[in-house]
Amino acid sequence: MPSKSKAQQKAAGAALAAKRGEANKSDLKGASREMYDSMSESQLEDFAETKRKGKPEHVDD
């Protein structure tokens, strides 16, 4: 499933980096922390690889 906004894509990228050990889990906050805890690495890859061009900064769900 692709991300719906730039913010969601960025949060997924941060969570993915922490899952891979490239960033500290303790540095995650908010949405990225929730994504880290609730999503698998492959799910995070799907969100993070979404292109940002044409996406809104934020989307209300």
Image (tube, helix red, strand yellow):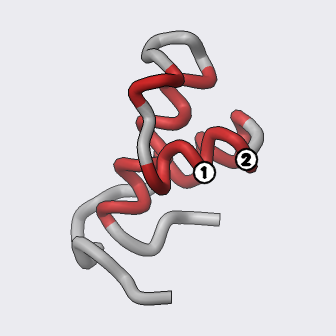
Tag 1, which secondary structure?
A: helix
Please state the horizontal and vertical placement of residue 37, each as a whole percent of the image.
Answer: 70, 42
Taking the image as shown, residue 14 lies to the left or right of residue 41, namely left
**On screen, residue 21 above or below 43:** above
Going by the picture, which residue comes out furthest to the bottom? 60
Q: Nearer the viewer, residue 25 or 39?
A: 25
Q: Nearer the viewer, mark 1 or mark 2?
A: 1
How many discs mark residues in the rendered view? 2
**Residue in the picture at 46% in, 16% down:** 24
| Label 2 environment density (alpha carbons within 10 Å; few <14, some 14–19, many ≥20) | some
Tag 2, which secondary structure?
A: loop
Dot 1 or dot 2: first in sequence order is 1
**On screen, residue 21 above or below 60:** above
How far is disc 1 from disc 2 in space, using C-alphas?
8 Å
User: What residue type is disc 2 on?
Assistant: Met
Q: Which mark is residue 34?
A: 1
User: What residue type is disc 1 on?
Assistant: Glu
Q: Which mark is residue 39?
A: 2
Which quarter of the rendered picture does the N terminus lie within? bottom right
Q: Which mark is residue 54?
A: none
Please state the horizontal and vertical placement of residue 45, each as a whole percent of the image.
Answer: 59, 41
Taking the image as shown, residue 16 lies to the left or right of residue 14, namely right
